[in-house]
Image: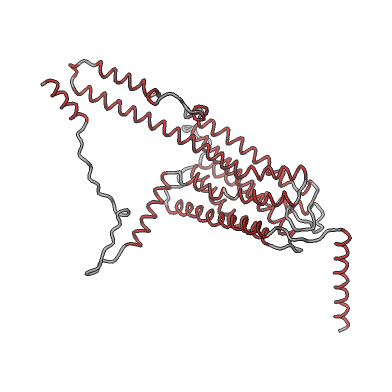
Amino acid sequence: AYGVMVMEMSQGSDAQDFIRDDHLSGVTWHMPYSLGFQVSLTAFLMLELVLGFSSNLTVLVLYCSQSNLVDSVSNMVTVNLHVLDIAVCLLCVPLTLVVVLLPPGPNLALLCCFHEACVTFASIATAINILVISLDRYDISVRPANRLLTTRRAALLLTAVWITSVAVFFMPFLEVQWSEWRNRTLLCVGGQGYYRGLGMYYHLILQVPIFFVTVVVMLFTYSRILRALNIRIGSHMRKTTSPPAQSSAAPLIASEAGAATALPTTMGVQASVSAIIALRRAVRRHRDRRERQKRVFKMSLIIITTFLCCWAPLSVTNILILSIGPSDVLVSLRLWFLALAYGTTVSHPLLYAFTRQKLRRALRAKVKKRVVSLLQVDPSPGGTVIHNSWVETRKTKRTSRPLIPQMIFICWLKTNN
């Protein structure tokens, strides 16, 4: 009993010394975030978690179920990006939720250090993967016959990307080991102050240049892709006042039409039919080429804009923290911008996966099979059979229309008569 009493007295004296030290230093624990901040940010993160995980998992299931989808370097780097997005949804987003909802305590410093490690991993890994995808698209568009990214080189490059991403994960822990701990938090509101030394923010110094390097590489690669497709960026930015009839297809139509009318009548109807068919094919090729150019330009603009809108605010906040030091306002604002950056887990499947025709066909086939399995009824005497016009193959009757040679032959007969 005497030993227990001495132990209680020693613990009480230690607690009094701890409270006295905190009182003398003027540092106390306080509630980190308001209720409205926690509710709104939690709802936003939960929405990103559900949408990002489900969409990326759907893409990976489609790629794994169809062996012909992962048959090129472009599909390899795209699958690698979706694997990274699933890792971000399962590791980084839940930890950000814990940081937002967890009340302050003695373990907050270690939790914030682990959270910064996850943020560093997500930021650098996403930027490097986007950079690799941009280089791959540049390689396949500008150098289609002599590609630099072969399957073996792409595998080595993706291995290096994962090694780098895992290595930067441990940077915040090494920074804490190099500096004094003193129960201060690493960019978390609610602790006993922030680290003010620059040696604790090397992970932020690393994130900023990698972001800007990725943006520069994206602008360069996509501009060269557009140039390879003979797309002038300025012509898409301004509205043309010329009528549609004055397009580049007009000289072709005029020349072909002139050549067709200049043909002597003795060559017969077959030459006229061949000229009209050749004209229609030329116009169709020109129209398809213009549509492809517009589609590539729009997708390039959307990809670059999405990456800038999601990751640029977080990078600017990191620059402010490095320049003027961390504060409660900057740290809270950084959490919102981090949640915005997590939005790329939702946009990546839409921009890089579902824009591929093979993946869309595989998705339609899976959905149709699922609907058929749900609607199929075993045939029984007197039982009803459910028919679904969307699932069943359509047997449309083609409307009978006269062919071009027949029309020309009829016109020729009328003129001769």
Left or right of 88? Residue 369 is: left
Q: Position of residue 159 (x, y in %)?
A: 59, 47
Q: In which quarter of the image is residue 158?
A: top right
Horizontal relation, residue 11 to residue 190: left or right:
right
Q: In this view, does 391 lie to the left or right of 76?
A: left
Residue at image point 85% right, 77% down: 8
Name which residue lies at 25% across and 49% down.
Answer: 395
Scheme by which the image is coloured: secondary structure
Instruction: Please provide percent x and percent y for residue 254.
Output: 33, 20
The percent position of residue 200, horizontal first and vertical second, equals: 77, 49
The answer to which of 417 and 230 lies nearer the viewer is 417
Question: Up-down: is 71 above or below 387?
Answer: above
The vertical placement of 21 against 323, above or below, is below
Instruction: Pick whichever, 151 or 31, lies toward us.
Output: 31
Total numbered circles: 0
Name the quadrant containing residue 160: top right
Q: Position of residue 153 (x, y in %)?
A: 55, 41
| Residue at the farthest bottom position | 1
- Quadrant containing the N terminus in the rendered view: bottom right
Instruction: Give 60 or 46, whichever is nearer the viewer.
Output: 46
Tell me the quarter of the image containing the C terminus.
top left
Horizontally, residue 412 falls left or right of residue 193, namely: left
